[in-house]
Amino acid sequence: MKDLMAERTVDTQKLKISARNVQVYYGDTHAIKDVNVDIEDKTVTAFIGPSGCGKSTFLRCINRMNDTIDVCRVQGDIMIDGEDIYDKRVDPVQLRAKVGMVFQKPNPFPKSIYDNVAYGPRIHGLAKNKADLDDIVERALRRGAIWNEVKDRLDAPGTGLSGGQQQRLCIARAVATEPEVLLMDEPCSALDPIATAQVEELIDELRQNYSVVIVTHSMQQAARVSQKTAFFHLGNLVEYGETGTIFTNPTDPRTESYITGRIG
Amino acid sequence: MTDMTSDTPHVHGTLLQADARTRKRNAAETRFKFYGILAIAVGLLMLVILLFNIVSRGTGAFTQTFVTLDVALVEDKLDKSGNRNIEEMKKVSTFGYAPLLKAAMTDMVEKTGMEGQISAADMAGILSKGAPAQLRDYVLANPDKVGQQVSFNFLASSRVDGYMKGRVSRESIANDKSISAEQLDFVDKLIEQGILKKKFNLSFITGADASDARPEAAGMGVAMLGSFFMMLVVLVLALPIGVAASIYLEEFAPKNWITDIIEVNISNLAAVPSIVFGILGLAVFINYMHLPTSAPLVGGLVLTLMTLPTIIISTRASLKAVPPSIRDAALGVGASKMQSVFHHVLPLAAPGILTGTIIGLAQALGETAPLLLIGMVGFIASNPPDGIASGLLAPNSAMPAQIYEWAKRADPAFYERAWGGIIILLVFLLAMNTIAVILRRRFERRW
Amino acid sequence: MSELFNGLIGGSAAGLMVIVVLGLSALGFYMARSRAMASGGGDRRNLHSLPNYYGWNAAMLTAVPALGVLVIWLLAQPMMIDSAVFKTIPDSAIAEGSSRGLVMSDVRRLADGLDVIVERGVMDAESAATLDANTTDLRATLAAEGVALGSAVEQPVLDAAQMYRTQSSTGRFWMTVLVSAIALLAFVVSLRLATADFRARNVVEKGILALLILSASIAILTTVGIVLSMLFESINFFRLHSWTDFFFGSTWAPNFRGDSDLSILPLLWGTLYISIIALLVAVPIGLFSAIYLSEYAGPKVRSAAKPLLEILAGIPTIVYGLFALLTVGPALVNIFGRGEQGLLGVEWMSGATSVLTAGLVMGIMLIPFVSSLSDDIINAVPQAMRDGSLGLGATHSETIRQVVIPAALPGIVGAILLAASRAIGETMIVVLGAGAIAKISANPLEAMTTITTRIVSQLTGDTNFASPETLVAFALGLTLFVLTLGLNVIALYIVRKYREQYD
Ligand SMILES: Nc1ncnc2c1ncn2[C@@H]1O[C@H](COP(=O)(O)OP(=O)(O)OP(=O)(O)O)[C@@H](O)[C@H]1O
Ligand SMILES: [Mg+2]
């Protein structure tokens, strides 16, 4: 673990997302308690914490996916590029084009590989013409590190790919809409080690262009891919800082217990 | 993975203002949602129109116009010998009673000061053609009243009734031979005098069907009994057979191709058009087994076959809902598999089974098409059955078949009765479904 | 009570037998139970099984074999007598253009007719048995009692009918003897079995299992009954009428004097046309309702609107038939007909019955059918699929149109096929709302007729199972059965595959 940390370069980036006093309720359950966090641009930020501590919930607040859950209420402010995304004037549809999301289980649409990737650009009107769209799809698939595997069968259904390929397809799909922030909720939990390695490599590449927020249960993964780490516990953000610091020198005893495997 | 340096990240504008494209997409969203609301609204509107139609056109059947007449039961005409011998009195046919009615009418016309306004034939046309028969039935039941003056409530003819209910108007009778403008004038007078009145008509609910010429006398009662006996057959056969079949398939059947065939068979039978069951009934029960036509027994058998799949499907669902732990518990204390099913699983599944059975019965109660083929329409179901055997075997109609029969007679007076019959049928269905819902609510168990 | 009893005896010997056997079986129950108790010295712990099992064993043993034989006898007797009588009909009795099978159906009618007149006391049993076709006008006598015969009665036919009657009554006699004997024998045996060591429970449970299996196979028997009954009569029909005319002819014109054109095509056209209109109404409304209810509506709206829509499915079809004939039809005439007085001032529609009338009303009936099936299917699409789309910034409607519906498409197609099969087999709405004119026309305002209405019209009223005009109904029924069954099998297959995909 030490070696991994050593080669990490930590340079300060400009602020992308800032959350202030965020509270989330599911009906009467208080799922997120007064969370404050600043997430930087062109950085991979990892959310870790025991199951049910509210990582997914908080992640889904960032692109307002929680709006689709009837019982869910969000209080506090979340600013992206200085704009409050819970402002009445903000259209969540437009927000989600800017803040993309990749889910725990690969969820390709029952369409061809091409149509899966072209879906976002089509609805957001990103392509001027067919050639342009082809171009966008190819670029996205390349960025998703899956181009070589599927370039000969773009018309095949996306559901016919292997789990790892499906998840990379989903990442390519998210990338194709050209978001600025990419949220990933346990993107590797359904994948085998090889596919996991491919996705992790991909995440590292994505950092050049995006602010990536990733939820993970694997401490090693958080250590490998992220520059910043946030530790959640029972709905509280317990500790947030440089990944190296969190893993080697946590300040809060709860963080330490979790990392050393005593809670969670 | 290195050839992405050429990328220039897409720049998103401010979030605080929706761009043109988003506005367009949101408009499409609103439209789409509106279509959904529209579809539901149309569906509900149809329901409202349908129910409104039924109620507004059918309630009339529950009231009927009656004429109050004092009839002198002249002994000379009804019982010449004067010894009140019923057998002898029976020899006087309804024709013998008509003059009494005519005399009573003339009498009434005189008393109310309307002489010369109406001819004798027109006068008789006011009353139902069944009036003499009603008189005769009364006399034969009360021979001691002969020689006295008795006040009767006679049904008015269907045209007069239609006039009272707004179905018949002075404009509409131009081509109608059954009633004339003079008669309507007369009817207006009778209404003024309080002799002609609309009243609640219990005999529509309890009475028998009547011939084409007397829509005013037709009732649902006998057809209701027909339906009752059919439902009895369905209940007695379909419930035990359905439950037994479900128990076998759910609890005992090995997984093999025979069980598969039975399963596929049942789900397909549930979707076979009901008329096909009618053909089966005609070919097997009537042509081959020589059971009597038009008998509720045959109707019940056909409906049993039709309802079985429904009952089996719902029973199996209820059995499946009983958790395996109950079976294990019973087996664990040394019960046999059969005992665990009959002592533990079945009682727990009973409410669900009952609910499914009631819903199946409700379906069967409203079914018409197969009944047409086994002859439960096309005649007048005039005599109520006098026992279980005749209830099962004597020709009868059934509620939906009776409604169809009236609809076919192409007379607005019968249409009104058809709608009224629908109200009665729907009341039964509503009651059954309500019971089913209550049962489900009351006994619903979450494991 | 005695009246009831008489009714049952008069109605059939079988009814009496059932009562007797059940009575004996109940008696067996009590006697076997007490015998078992007695043999166990009055202490139930000495018995192998609970005392009731001994009772059940006796009851079952007494009733089941006897009733089984009774049922088999009742099913087999007509067939045996038929074939025996069949052989005795001389070739000379078969008129030109007729067939043995048709003469046979005359024989059966005549035999039934004679039974009827004896029962009603028009003739005593003695003189009915010694009738002479040349001296009595049987056809007129029977017609007076409401039994219609196809032709005047010939002596050979009368002889065959008399044979039919004697054999039937002999059959009934032997049936009574045999069934009583079996029941009694079983009764005695089961009582002797009722001793303490007898493993009553195991035997009873085996018996019950057999009964359960029997019940489960009734579904198969029903299907077999449906297929066979229609197949036999259809074969009879195709003996009398060319199959090419039936399947490929262009006219439907039954003529009870014979020589009819009986082609299914005009009926099929009417059926399909009406079904298509019905689907055009039901599919958009039903599908959009389902989409709204499952994707947009809050729990309150959903729990109110869904059952309300489903009321439409619970309303009997006769009600829709009446609605078509008396409400929708006249309303359409007001719009499209009545010339100057009509709403559009046109004269396109003359009567209330038409393809459009029946189609619209059938569409209304199918709305809840389509909507609740689609609702289930849309709900089976995994939430992850929707999240994926919403997460990319798609609006809800884009998600529904481009992800949910394509994902649910196979299931929805299955639902539509099921609805189509319903529409094709629907009877009452078309009987009352579609009309009776068989023709192939594209005008939806004209009256047309369907397969189901023709089945009803050919099989109600005076039916003569020797004429192609009646038998054609069975060929129509078989076609209808095959058509709807095919649609159902395909639809159920598609839906099952669809479900498996998301399980
Ligand atoms: N749709 C919902 N309705 C009600 N409560 C919810 C819902 N989703 C989550 N919760 C509750 O909110 C809390 C946080 O859940 P969340 O899914 O955010 O946890 P998590 O940290 O992502 O856990 P995991 O690591 O298992 O994914 C939990 O207590 C959970 O029960
Ligand atoms: Mg989570």
Image (cartoon, grey):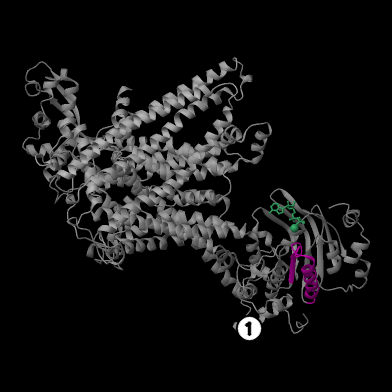
Question: Which of these two is toward me, B194 or C402?
Answer: C402
Callout 1: helix, strand or loop? helix
Please say if B221 is above or below C251: above
Quadrant of the frame with the C terminus of chain C: bottom right
In the image, residue B126 lies at what x, y percent? 15, 38
In the image, residue C89 lies at what x, y percent? 21, 47
Tell me the residue at 75%/53% (across/down): A31
Please say if C280 is above or below C431: below
Question: Which of these two is toward me, A129 or A23?
Answer: A129
**Quadrant position of ligand 1:** bottom right
Q: In which quarter of the image is residue C235?
A: bottom left
Question: Which of these two is toward me, C470 or B413?
Answer: C470
Q: Is residue C217 left or right of residue B97?
A: right
Q: Name the residue under label 1.
A: A132
Please say if A29 is above or below C288: above
Which residues, given as a range, are shown in magenta?
A181-208
Question: Which of these two is toward me, A209 or B362?
Answer: B362
Q: Is residue C386 left or right of residue B116?
A: right
Please say if C388 is above or below C48: below
In the image, residue A27 lies at what x, y percent? 68, 50
Q: In this view, does A132 lie to the left or right of C88?
A: right
Residues packed near mark 1 inside 10 Å, few (<14), some (14 to 19) or many (20 plus): few
In the image, residue C19 lies at what x, y percent? 38, 27
Q: Can residue B53 be seen in this view?
A: no
What amino acid is labelled 1 in the image? Asp
User: In the image, is residue B257 part of the stretch drawn in magenta?
Assistant: no
Q: In this view, does C417 lie to the left or right of B371?
A: right
Quadrant of the frame with the N terminus of chain C: top left
Q: Is residue B440 visible?
A: yes
User: In the image, is residue A187 part of the stretch drawn in magenta?
Assistant: yes
